[in-house]
Image (cartoon, coloured by chain):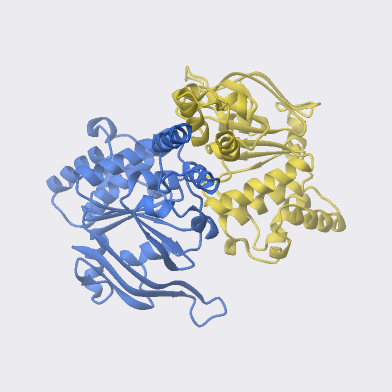
Amino acid sequence: MSIKAENIKYIYSDGTPFRTVALEDVNLEINEGDFLGIIGHTGSGKSTLIQLLNGLEKPSEGKIAVDGTVVGEDKKMLSKIRQTVGLVFQYPEYQLFEETVAKDVAFGPLNLKLSNDEIDKRVRESLELVGFNYNKIKDASPFDLSGGQKRRVAIAGVLAMKPNYLVLDEPTAGLDPAGRNELFAQIKKLHERANVTVILISHSMEDIAKLVNRVVVLSKGKIHMEGSPKEIYAQAEELEKIGLGVPQVAQIVNELRKRGFEIKNDIITVEEAKEEIMREVRRRHV
Amino acid sequence: MENIIRIENVKYKYDKEDNAYAVDGVNLDIRKGEFTAIIGHNGSGKSTLAKLINSLLLPVEGKIYVKGMDTSDDSKLWDIRQTAGMVFQNPDNQLVATIVEEDIAFGPENQGVEPEEIRRRVDAALNAVGMYEFRKRPPHMLSGGQKQRIAIAGILALNSDCIILDEPTAMLDPSGRKEVMETLGKLKEQGKTILLITHYMDEAVQADRVVIMDKGNIKLDGTPKEVFRNIDEIKRFGLDVPQVTELAQALAKEGLNIPYDTIDVKELVDALCQ
């Protein structure tokens, strides 16, 4: 089971003066159980890519297969694909509209024509998966919740569709550090316990470094780098060249190495940096 | 230096029935030309404070003066909003026109400014934010960082002395954030007073002064160095601390001679390479 993208090309406004190649030569395989991070500056093609993954857009060239089904080949399969690949847009809380949290989460499953028992079960499970106490939250109005809570309700709405893949576009944008940590902890749990494959788009290099096991870096519509977070952040200068930041710790390590410190280049946490620097300082004083 | 904003014992709550105040007895003076960053978790009262300064909200108790004008004085409302202009988080919610330069002209037009003067102000504002070459573009074709620079230019065209920005970079990517921060740095050099509300500690360290809010009140207030050295306290408020300060203090605890108030990468690297 996997999502496979082969030789993807995507062109916006083809045949007009605004013709833009948003994606080119993109080959990517996302396997079940992955926790994939996608980073890239604005306009690098990230959002286009995820819209292709669940069939909201069709590639101009190349093909995408979700668990073996080629996206767009059979129109009747599109709703199945969109259910398999759950997409949480940026600022999903703006999409909440129902009177109560439970009704909002139930909206998707209702459209699947499931039995009432099954719908209730899914609503309860989904809300619990994102860390709510079902009985306490179910009758609340989504509009009385905090920003972080609203966002979790919106994610629960996607989870209620039982997707195998969960795609999150900048899920923590605009949240404060506490709200961000809380949401990421929930996403991590989802990945570990509910066995959902997660694809996370984020600008926050620190967060990507902490969470994912594989990173894809997009630049100008192409896959520029791919690897583990450590492999990617070891190339601080390359990342900065394509308009991306690196975690502050990686900057420090990079500068120290330039000034002759013999330390590893793939450090991404403060604790690791401290250990490495102390080891080097002791080595120098022997 | 003259205080452009005076906040005296200000309290505010959204709901009369509510016992807790969103802003609970704040005293704060902002000097002219100062670049102040306000940080605090969601619900700490920082955005409410910004709206109080801009007279979008009125204090339940206490007084706020903007350039000597009382924000609860109805007749001064437009002068206050002109003196202290606001930029909000979402770049798509604050641009109104279909062409960049028309958007910037919108404010002065409404004030009845003469057409030649509007032209002069719009050009000056576009140059100040480095967007002159984009003046004929439709705003929706711009990146988030560029849109925020246009929103800032719209305030400059009103000849505002003070710019209040409520998480202007929350929706931007790293290069967009950098653009906005560089623009703010330039405006500071030109003598503008800047009040920046942010969650990003790397932005706060670029300010002259950092104010940390928690539960409607000011908990820490000082230069970035004075404030960020208190990492344990800041973490207790649910906030991040700069990784460089955390690393500096961890190394100092191991016995290295590194100042506790290190806030900058270069500073730490220099100290280690001595």
Colour of chain A in the rendered structure image: blue
* Depth order, front residue of A233/A214: A233
- Residue A230 image offset from top left, x and y in percent: 37, 50
- Residue B19 image offset from top left, x and y in percent: 47, 17
Q: Report whether B158 appears left or right of B97.
A: right
* Depth order, front residue of A55/A144: A55
- Residue B267 image offset from top left, x and y in percent: 60, 36
* Depth order, front residue of B113/A233: A233
Say if residue A15 shows up in the picture. Answer: yes
Q: Report whether A71 appears left or right of A17.
A: left
User: As displayed, is residue A209 above or below residue A214?
Assistant: above
* Depth order, front residue of A124/A186: A186
Q: Which chain is yellow?
A: B
Q: Report whether A99 appears left or right of B264.
A: left
* Image quadrant occupied by the N terminus of chain A: bottom left
Name the image quarter holding residue B124.
Answer: bottom right
Say if residue A146 shows up in the picture. Answer: no
* Residue at x 19%, y 41% (from the top left corner): A125
* Residue at x 64%, y 55% (from the top left corner): B96
* Image quadrant occupied by the C terminus of chain A: top left
- Residue A73 image offset from top left, x and y in percent: 25, 77
User: As displayed, is residue A189 above or below residue B133?
Assistant: above
* Residue at x 27%, y 30% (from the top left corner): A136
